[in-house]
Structures are given as structure tokens and as C-alpha cells.
């Protein structure tokens, strides 16, 4: 260990992610929803684990507010938040505090203004600026230092996602004794897009600090290997790449693999089976006027999700079938849009676009008391989402680009009676696995309309067969299998004297 390294901690397994798995409502901490959090907490609990992340609160500090003209005012109005460590069922929560400048530069400008759009096929223009990158670098260093401090000798550290691309190499420098995994939840872009990134070499070097690099799809893993070869002279190897540079650990093998993430299938099925859920689903259908077909979309309000394209195609479908309309809406769309990242311009614009389209489609096709688009812009409890999955006939998952898309898997896991049709974008990671869905190119408006028509007309026996196959697949590939297979790969990467409980973890 270098002389200036933080002392080693006591945790055998350390998860490092932008957000902690807890959030505060009215001053009280709650476990955050989602299969990923549940799976990781389960694994951490059995291994004396720690989770390093941001609490979601912005630390106090001077905030510069534009007041118009040349004047700016410095105010300090943000509530203080305790940086004390939290304990959640024997797992240590280690907050990495972010102040307003960190939030702006690291989270909004670099993570969600530069990396997110570029890694999603450059659907929106990325903005790059050196000042923001310096803060991203600094925040990554603080995460790496917190991990170095928490990890026991020879521990395993699992770093997550695009906010923390530099952490693996920083951590390796501080703690060469630990085994480092990195999983990217979003797509890894093709070479011609990645080459636009001003900090492309630094990002590759950051990732090459890991022992195991996990991607959602094989195309992402291939993109990475190609770039590591091209820009860092790494040598492709049957299990990944071999480092060819002294500063990165010459000759070291970085394993590169595909680990498609999944959901907590049992939890979704348990909710879908509950009598209250079935009753709620029946109420939803009744409240909508018993339409012949309910389309459903559930997304974060993000331009990658293609909500606008879907609304346009839904409008086109209704226009084509206008003659079939009577007094009530025979076909409706429920669109849930969960707000987020609202300080980033492209998200504000996307909201306006979506809301204008909702107005247009309803303006053209609604009748009194029967809107055709039911648009809800807020976050819903999982129980309500599952009731919607059960109530719907056709699920629309049509992102322009998506790392995986867990909504597609949740819909499948909810359809206990094997009814319903999933329309799924070819550009979602889930399309590699959910091949019995109606796969569609979301960039082609006619193709979405054709897929909607195909789904409406699909014979129940065909839909039943396809949903059964989908459900069989999802049931056999849960988030627990995913976590176990990644940890298994890390076990294989561990040096021979590493903690034995990391070696031989079950393969998913
Ligand atoms: O899909 C990437 C991701 O970072 C998820 O891990 C996360 O749940 C989601 O986006 C929400 O993003 P944010 O933390 O910016 O609200």
C-alpha cells in the first residue's frame, strides 16, 4: 500500500454508487425502491458490507444565484445535512457529501450533460467543459478514497455506473490489494461516438483499473475492448484485455463480460398475485370506461425513453382508426412519466415536448369525459405500478436507446396469467433477451404504428405462448442471479490468497 494511502477498513465487500440505497422523506430515512438495491443489500448483509454513495442532499455552502444584469447574490439557504454514517440492517452507509458546485458540475454537467447523452447514441448534443470535468475528477477521487478507507485487506469493491468512471484506477492506486469490479448500467457507445469525448483516454484508463468490467450487452463490451486496443494499446484476450502500459499494471488481465441486469421477480409476482392488486387493476379499467385496449408506458421523463415518438405514433394510430370511434375511447394510453434531472436543459425541453404532444393527441381524439392519453408525471409506488401492469393489455417500451430497461421485465413478471403483449425497442438492452416481444425500431413511426396494430390483432393463443416464453426467461434470470454471476467473476479475478467466500459464488 502506498505510504499516503488511507488505512484499510473492515469491510469485505464495498459497493460504490452515486446514490446511497436510502433517501430521506420528511427527515426520516427510507430504503430506496428497486430490485438492484434489494439484491445488493442482500449480498452486503452476508459479507459485512458497506455502501458508499451520495445521500441525495446538497450540503450547505455558498450558492451563487444569478439576479439579472451583472449582479450575483451569494446566499446560503440550503438545509444542513448530517454527514454521520448510517447503519441499515448491519450494513454501513458511508455518505460522500456533495455541495452545490459538485452537484452542478459532477452530476448535472458531466454525468448527465456530457456522458449520458453521448453514451445514449448522442441523441442530444453533449456539452464538455474543463471546469466541470475537474470537479467530476475530484468527486471521483473522494469516492475512491472513501472506498479505500472502508475496504478490508483483500476486500472486493464493486463500483457502479457512469458517474464513477475514474474510480477503479484511483482505487487501485490507493489500494492495490483489493479486487475491483465495475458495472456500467447504461450502454457503452461505439468508437466513432466515444472518440468525441475530450477525456477519452482518462476514462479508459479509469475503467482499466478494474479487475472485472461488466456491461449490459455484448455490443457494449465489444465497443470497450475495441477502444482499449485502439487508444491504450491493450491486447484483446479471450476473457477481456491485457494491459500494455506500466502505469496501469503491465500484463494485468482485465476481464470484460456481459451481465444483463434483472429484477426481483418474486416481489413483482407477489404483488401481482395479491387480491388488492387485482381489485385495483379492475378499478383502473372501470375508471377508464372499460376500453377495448389499454396501452401503457412507464418511464423516467428522459429523452432517451422515446415517449414523444410513442405519443406521435399513438396519435397516428387513432387517426387511422378514427372511423371506429364511438362515444367512449376504445383505445387508451396511460403514460407514467417519473420526473428527474430537472436542472438539465434537455430534460426541461423534453417535458415540454411530451406535454405538448399529450395535449395534441387528446385535443384531436378525446371525447367528453374520455381522454385518450392519461398522462401522470410523478413517481408511483411499486404496488400501483404493478396494478397498472396487470390492468394493461399492451406495454410500450420504446426507448431510442436504453442500457437494459427493467420496466419491460417487470411487466412480464406481472403477467401471471400469460396474457398481454410487450412492444419492445430493438435499442433497449432487454431486446437481446426478450426475443418473444414484438420488437420494433422506435425511430420509424410507421413501424411503431404497425407494432401497435399487430399487438391489438394478435390471437390470444399466440400472445399466451409468447408471454409464457418471456416469463420463463425472466423467472430464470433474476437480479439475484445477476449479482451472483458478477461476484463469481470477481471471485475468479481474486488473487489466490483472497477471502475464500468470494471465490466460487454461484453462476447466474
Ligand atoms: O439508468 C441509469 C441510472 O443512473 C440508474 O442507475 C438510476 O436508477 C437512474 O438512472 C436514475 O437516475 P438519477 O440518479 O439521475 O435520478
Image (tube, rainbow, N blue to C red):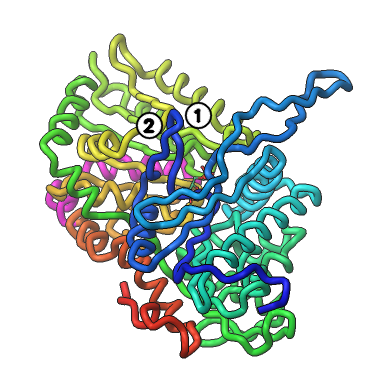
Magenta stretch: includes residue 234: no
Q: How many marks?
A: 2
Image-based side of 100 in relation to 72, left or right: left
Question: From which residue to which does the magenta span run?
Answer: 443-465
Residue lying at 65% horizontally and 63% vertically, measured from the top left: 166
The front one of 176 and 103 is 176
Residue 153 image position (x, y, % from top left) = 53, 77
> Residue 335, labelled with which disc?
2
Image-based side of 164 in relation to 402, left or right: right
Q: Residue furthest top?
A: 368
Tell me where residue 102 sits by quadrant: top right
Query: Is 244 located above or below residue 191 in the figure?
Result: below
Residue 351 image position (x, y, % from top left) = 54, 29
Residue lying at 36% horizontally and 37% vertically, measured from the top left: 297
Residue lying at 74% horizontally and 25% vertically, measured from the top left: 75
The front one of 136 and 322 is 136
The front one of 39 and 261 is 39
Q: Are marks 1 and 2 in contact (CB under 8 Å)?
A: yes
Amino acid at each position: 500500500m502506498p505510504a499516503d494511502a488511507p488505512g484499510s477498513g473492515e469491510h469485505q465487500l464495498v459497493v460504490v454508487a452515486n446514490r446511497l440505497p436510502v433517501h430521506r422523506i420528511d427527515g426520516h430515512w427510507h430504503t430506496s425502491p428497486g430490485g438492484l438495491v434489494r439484491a445488493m443489500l442482500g449480498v452486503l448483509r452476508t459479507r459485512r458490507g458497506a455502501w458508499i454513495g451520495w445521500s441525495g442532499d446538497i450540503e450547505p455552502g455558498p450558492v451563487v444565484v444569478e439576479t439579472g444584469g451583472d449582479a450575483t447574490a451569494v446566499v446560503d439557504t440550503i438545509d444542513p445535512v448530517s454527514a454521520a454514517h448510517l447503519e441499515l440492517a448491519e450494513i454501513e452507509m458511508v455518505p460522500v457529501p456533495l455541495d452545490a458546485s459538485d452537484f452542478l458540475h459532477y452530476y448535472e454537467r458531466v454525468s448527465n450533460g456530457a456522458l449520458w447523452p453521448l453514451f445514449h447514441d448522442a441523441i442530444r448534443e453533449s456539452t464538455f467543459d474543463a471546469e466541470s470535468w475537474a470537479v467530476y475528477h475530484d468527486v471521483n477521487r473522494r469516492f475512491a478514497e472513501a472506498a479505500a478507507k472502508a475496504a478490508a485487506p483483500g476486500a472486493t469493491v464493486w463500483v457502479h455506473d457512469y458517474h464513477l468512471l475514474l474510480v477503479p484506477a484511483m482505487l487501485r492506486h490507493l489500494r492495490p490489494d483489493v479486487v475491483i469490479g465495475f458495472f456500467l448500467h447504461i450502454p457503452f457507445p461505439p468508437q466513432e461516438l466515444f472518440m468525441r469525448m475530450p477525456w477519452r483516454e482518462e476514462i479508459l484508463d479509469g475503467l482499466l483499473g478494474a479487475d472485472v468490467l461488466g456491461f449490459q450487452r455484448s455490443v457494449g463490451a465489444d465497443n470497450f475492448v475495441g477502444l482499449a486496443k485502439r487508444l491504450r494499446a491493450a491486447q484483446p484476450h479471450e476473457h477481456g484485455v491485457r494491459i500494455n502500459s506500466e502505469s496501469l499494471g503491465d500484463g494485468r488481465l482485465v476481464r470484460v463480460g456481459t451481465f444483463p441486469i434483472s429484477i426481483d421477480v418474486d416481489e413483482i409476482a407477489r404483488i401481482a398475485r395479491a387480491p388488492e392488486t387485482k381489485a385495483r387493476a379492475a378499478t383502473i379499467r372501470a375508471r377508464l370506461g372499460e376500453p377495448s385496449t389499454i396501452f401503457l408506458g412507464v418511464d423516467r421523463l428522459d429523452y432517451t425513453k422515446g415517449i414523444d415518438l410513442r405519443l406521435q405514433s399513438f396519435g397516428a394510430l387513432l387517426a387511422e382508426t378514427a372511423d371506429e370511434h364511438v362515444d367512449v375511447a376504445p383505445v387508451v394510453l396511460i403514460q407514467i412519466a417519473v420526473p428527474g434531472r430537472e436542472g438539465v436543459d434537455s430534460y426541461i425541453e423534453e417535458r415540454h415536448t411530451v406535454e405538448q404532444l399529450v395535449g395534441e393527441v387528446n385535443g384531436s381524439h378525446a371525447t367528453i369525459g374520455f381522454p385518450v392519453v392519461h398522462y401522470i408525471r410523478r413517481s408511483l409506488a411499486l404496488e400501483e405500478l404493478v396494478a397498472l401492469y396487470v390492468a394493461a393489455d399492451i406495454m410500450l417500451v420504446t426507448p431510442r436507446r436504453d442500457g437494459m430497461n427493467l420496466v419491460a421485465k417487470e411487466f412480464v413478471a406481472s403477467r401471471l396469467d400469460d396474457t398481454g403483449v410487450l412492444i419492445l425497442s430493438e435499442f433497449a438492452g432487454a431486446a437481446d433477451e426478450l426475443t418473444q416481444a414484438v420488437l420494433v425500431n422506435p425511430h420509424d413511426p410507421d413501424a411503431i404504428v404497425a407494432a401497435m396494430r399487430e399487438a391489438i390483432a394478435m390471437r390470444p393463443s399466440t400472445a399466451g405462448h409468447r408471454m409464457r416464453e418471456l416469463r420463463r426467461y425472466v423467472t430464470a434470470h433474476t437480479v439475484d442471479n445477476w449479482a451472483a454471476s458478477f461476484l463469481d467473476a470477481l471471485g475468479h479475478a481474486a488473487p489466490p490468497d483472497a477471502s475464500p467466500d468470494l471465490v466460487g459464488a454461484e453462476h447466474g
